[in-house]
């Protein structure tokens, strides 16, 4: 039966990083449209993270306020613990609480693996992966104290499935998937739900990749999924949703039944690969405990 009640964020406070343009802007505008008070974080930098002269965060705040919403601009960097703490503090100082964090800020420094250098790897990890830690750690304390929180991380198909020339970006995005799973386990009893999206949308970061298909994938088409995941009605926890152009699918980490032998040999692995990769009977663990339970059960069968 369909629930006809519209999702509302009246009374809630959201922090969206990298919200001056593209996907992040769409998140901030949608949450504000539904009643959230929003901290719009953006440095105004270029795609590679270099400094820019614009102030897109202020532009988004003006857009939200013109529509009757409440928002403040923030220009701190997610790449440092001090920046993350400052933007969370601003949310609490301006609006009295923080209910929602959308870790969206990102940069690209693509290069094939053999040409990667530290100056191409470290900034990408700092913004995407460490940035999520820097923002979420201080927000977590507030959410835990108030017994409620919603955190949405931004992963990517590059990290979940692989993409040429994006080892730095893909590793960071895969790390965010792992962070999502762990925080979902830790936050469950505290009323904090943590999920992730793997979005496909036409932005400054993807225009060269999407080419002629870009018109199918607007940034605005991602925001409804984030609005649901950020809502108090959302009971999902530890999930990753692939999103783009109005399409939503679940990305599941499954484990096959595999094989179990008392004396496993390299030759057995070689000869039974078909069984190892057979997806019939595969299951989706909720957490490490589920996976270990299946492993122990399989070992007990062959040892009895």
Image (cartoon, rainbow, N blue to C red):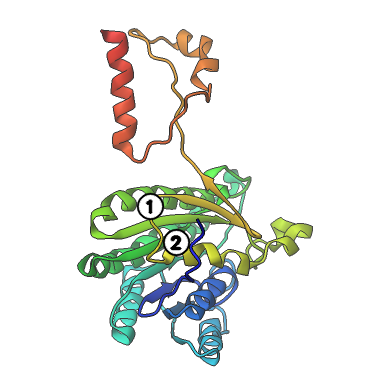
- Judging by the rendered image, the residue that carries numbered circle 2 is 229
Q: Secondary structure at mark 1?
A: loop
Q: CA distance from mark 2 to mark 1?
A: 9 Å
Residue 212 placement (x, y as % from top left): 79, 59
Please tell me whether residue 189 is drawn above or below residue 256 in the rendered image.
below
Q: State the residue position of label 1.
A: 237
Q: Foreground residue, 51 or 59?
A: 59
Residue 21: image x %, image y %? 58, 75
* On screen, residue 95 above or below 171: below
Name the foreground residue: 184 vs 1: 1
Q: Is residue 138 left or right of residue 285?
A: left
Q: Residue furthest front?
A: 1
Residue visible at 48% across and 75% down in the picture = 31
Front position in the image: 79 or 145: 145
In the rendered structure, the answer to whether residue 141 lies left or right of residue 119 reads: left
Please tell me in which quadrant of the rendered image residue 261 appears.
Answer: top left
Residue 52's label in the rendered image is none
> The C terminus is located in which quarter?
top left
Residue 104 shows up from this direction: no
Q: Position of residue 280 (x, y in %)?
A: 52, 23
Question: Which is nearer the eye, 35 or 145?
Answer: 35
Element type where label 2 sits in the image: helix
Residue 192 figure quarter:
bottom left
Task: Looking at this view, name the residue that lies furthest to the right.
Answer: 212
């Amino acid at each position: 039966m369909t629930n006809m009640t519209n999702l509302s964020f009246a009374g809630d406070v959201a922090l969206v990083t990298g919200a001056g343009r593209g996907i992040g802007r769409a998140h901030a505008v949608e949450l504000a449209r539904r009643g959230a008070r929003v901290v719009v974080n953006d440095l105004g930098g270029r795609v590679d993270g270099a400094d820019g002269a614009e102030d897109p965060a202020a532009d988004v705040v003006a857009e939200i306020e013109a529509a009757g919403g409440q928002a403040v601009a923030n220009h701190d960097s997610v790449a440092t613990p001090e920046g993350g703490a400052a933007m969370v503090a601003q949310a609490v100082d301006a609006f009295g609480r923080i209910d929602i964090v959308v870790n969206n800020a990102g940069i690209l420094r693509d290069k094939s693996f053999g040409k990667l250098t530290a100056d191409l790897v470290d900034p990408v990890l700092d913004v995407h992966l460490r940035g999520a830690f820097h923002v979420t750690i201080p927000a977590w304390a507030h959410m835990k104290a108030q017994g409620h929180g919603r955190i949405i991380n931004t992963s990517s198909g590059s990290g979940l499935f692989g993409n040429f020339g994006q080892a730095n970006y893909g590793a960071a995005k895969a790390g965010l998937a792992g962070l999502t799973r762990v925080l979902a386990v830790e936050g469950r009893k505290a009323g904090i739900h943590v999920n992730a999206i793997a979005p496909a949308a036409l932005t400054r970061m993807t225009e060269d990749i999407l080419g002629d298909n870009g018109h199918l994938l607007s940034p605005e088409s991602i925001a409804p999924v984030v609005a649901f995941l950020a809502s108090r009605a959302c009971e999902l926890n530890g999930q990753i949703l692939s999103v783009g152009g109005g399409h939503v699918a679940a990305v599941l980490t499954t484990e096959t039944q595999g094989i179990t032998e008392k004396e496993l040999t390299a030759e057995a692995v070689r000869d039974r690969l078909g069984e190892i990769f057979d997806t019939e009977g595969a299951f989706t663990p909720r957490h490490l405990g589920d996976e270990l339970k299946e492993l122990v059960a399989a070992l007990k069968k062959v040892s009895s």
